[in-house]
Image (cartoon, rainbow, N blue to C red):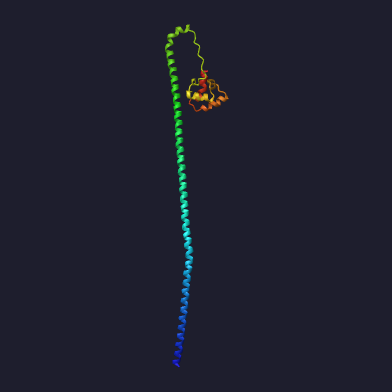
Amino acid sequence: MAKKAKQNVDKVVKKVNKEFEKTSTQIESLISDALKQFDSLQHQIQDPVRKLLKEVDELRDREMKRFNEEFERRMNEFHELQSSILERLGMASKEAGKEVKKLTDEVSKEATTAAKKAAPKTTAKKTSAKKAPAKKTAAKKSTPKVAKPVDKSNLTLVKGIGPATAKKMKDAGITSIDQIANPSEADQEKLKAFSGVKGFDQFSAEAKKIN
């Protein structure tokens, strides 16, 4: 009995081992299939991802190139604008310098002319003052001199008005000393253009002295 029971046990063990081996083989086959499917799936995922990454890199390169070109173009425009502004500022400075020099020359000429006019008058006064005592006796006998008529078109007779200013006044329509001494409303408007000339406030009073 014991021997027979042992044989039955061996048969069961063999059968179990056989089933186990069969099951193990099936499991290994399933695992192998699963791994193959995983590899295939991984390739399927990796290819689109690689393609997408490649497209992203290309897009980035294109955008960087476009940005660099745009930046360079804007910088060139900025440099051109900067050069243009500097050139204009340089021209404006030169023109301002010319105007200042011109005004300085005019003022210098007027001052020189005024000085020349003042010198003979002073000399004449001194000379007449010296000679006055010698002519005391003759003064009674001599006939009074007739004063020469004043050339009222000569605006430089007004103290403070030089040749350059006189020319500008005539161009503006002020052609007579009377227009300065007793200006009309229209003349006053014209004279306002010369309010910046030194001694302008005294022009009318000086002109009245001549009248």
Residue at 48% x, 72% y is 34
Residue at position x 42%, y 11% from top? 131
Residue 165 is situated, as x and y percent measured from the top left of the image, at: 49, 25
Q: Which residue is at a point 47% across and 47% down the rendered structure image?
A: 73
The foreground one among 181 and 165 is 165
Residue plotted at (46% across, 60% down):
54
Q: Quadrant of residue 185?
A: top right
As drawn, 56 above or below 102: below
The picture places residue 173, in percent across and down from the top left corner, at 54, 24
Horizontal and vertical percent for residue 14? Answer: 45, 85
In the rendered picture of this protein, how many numbered marks are placed on residues?
0
Q: Is residue 62 in view?
A: yes
Image quarter (top left, top right, bottom left or bottom right) of the N terminus: bottom left
Farthest right residue in view: 185
**Of the pair 51 and 7, the residue shown nearer to us:** 51
Provide residue 59's location: percent of width, then percent of height: 48, 56
The image shows residue 66, relative to residue 37, as above or below, that is above
| Residue 162 in view | no
